[in-house]
Image: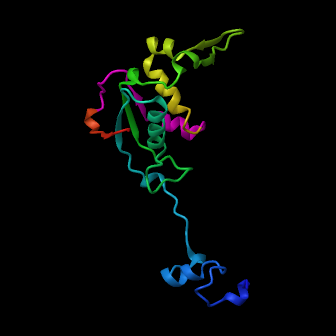
Amino acid sequence: MRLTKGQNKGRLSAPNYRGSTAKALTGINENNMKTFSAKAQDIERKWYVIDAADKVLGQVAVEAANLLRGKNKTIFTPHVDCGDYVIVVNADKVVLSGNKERAKIYTRYTGYVGNQVVTTPAKLRKSHPEKILELAILGMVPHTRQGRAQGTRLKVYAGAEHPHAAQTPEVIAIA
């Protein structure tokens, strides 16, 4: 027998009446709950360093994008920039899975008629090895003013050295 809302009032065992069990067990009134929204002054920014040597490009990019957006924090609010600073070292040693080193293409347009520039990761690795990781990470953050602000906190270096030792970055290990 299925009970309606009015018939179920006051009974704790029937799961049909929404919230009666939760209210009785926890003492929380569902009508007075407030959604937490982080404020700009509440944000504490930390520094993280990721070593990309012999790691798959997508795995490094996902971890870096999540740190840039602040999705690892309990106070994450989508419309507030609550991300951290991310340093990626050894960007020249990042690995692309499958045949992407030769088959993947990066396309950009210079602004002049007929000047569409197409390049592969193999060519890009010779001239600007950090650009491969930057494009992958920035493609995973929102393409808005907030995403561009989050992108300014991304620091990518081709070698193992970085000039941000004074910030004492925390090392993030990627499996």
Q: Nearer the viewer, residue 22 or 98?
A: 98
Q: In the picture shown, does residue 76 fall above or below 173? A: below
Quadrant hosting residue 147: top right
Looking at the rendering, the stretch of residues picked out in magenta corresponds to 143-164
At x 45%, y 45%, the residue is 83
At x 66%, y 14%, the residue is 111
Q: Position of residue 125 (x, y in %)?
A: 46, 15
Q: Position of residue 76 (x, y in %)?
A: 49, 53
Q: Residue furthest front?
A: 1
Quadrant showing the C terminus = top left
Task: Report the side of 48 relative to 39 (left or right).
Answer: left
Magenta stretch: includes residue 90: no
Quadrant hosting residue 1: bottom right
Q: Residue furthest top?
A: 114
Task: Report the side of 163 relative to 154 (left or right).
Answer: left
Magenta stretch: includes residue 161: yes
Q: Nearer the viewer, residue 131 or 148?
A: 131
Task: Report the side of 167 relative to 69 (left or right).
Answer: left
Q: Position of residue 31 (x, y in %)?
A: 60, 77
Q: In the picture shown, does residue 9 fall above or below 56? A: below
